[in-house]
Image (cartoon, helix red, strand yellow):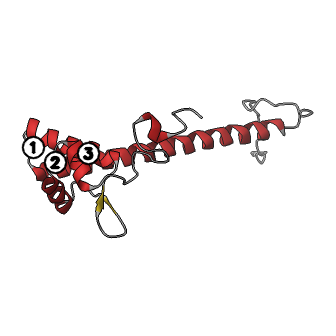
Amino acid sequence: MTTQDRPGQASGLPPGTDLDSPIFVISVAAELAGLHAQTLRGYDRLGLVSPGRSAGGGRRYSARDIALLREVQRLSQDEGVNLAGVKRIIELERTVDELRTQIGALLDELAAARVAAEQAAASVHASYRRDLVPVKQHTTIAVWRPTPKQPPQR
């Protein structure tokens, strides 16, 4: 088994965990994010970061939550974005990610539909009778209509 087979191993996480596993208590998460625990509580109240909860109700942060906390801090401190703006940016980035996922699924579905259509067309073409002779569709047909006889003139 490689480190790719064990997501926690490659990123320094405990075995059997991944980036979304809520494993860090608030004090550890605060230290890892470079923030104060009270700041994390405030971000939770504002809906910027939504950590998991333990059976007792305590906050448990994932590695992804910590990366998000760092991004919130970067946007607010380095870029000067207020917390309402940070929240909107995060929401928009999530929407973009969801839309990219949907687009990928739709592209896969479209590719499968194209393959099915090509197979159906090939099946129809294979079913054509080979003993029929094609006829030109552009043949001109002349219709002869006799002129009515005129009564003899006196």
Could you tell whether 120 is left or right of 55 in the image? right
**Tag 1: residue type?**
Val
**Is 89 placed above or below 131 here?**
below
Query: Do residues under tags 2 and 3 come within 8 Å of each other at their CB atoms?
Result: no
- Tell me which residue sits at (15%, 43%) in the image: 73
The residue wearing badge 3 is: 68
- Judge the density around disc 2: few (<14), some (14-19), many (≥20) Cα neighbours within 10 Å: some
Image point (77%, 48%), residue name: 151
Going from N to C along the chain, the mark reached first, 1 or 3, is: 3
Separation (CA) of disc 1 from disc 3: 15 Å
Q: Give the amino acid at mark 3.
A: Leu
Residue 112 in sight in this render: yes
Which mark is nearer the camera, 1 or 3?
A: 3
Q: Can residue 79 be seen in this view?
A: no
| Element marked by disc 2 | helix
Q: Would you name the residue on which mark 2 appears?
A: 86
Labelled pair 2, 1 in contact (Cβ < 8 Å): yes
Q: Is residue 1 left or right of residue 16?
A: right
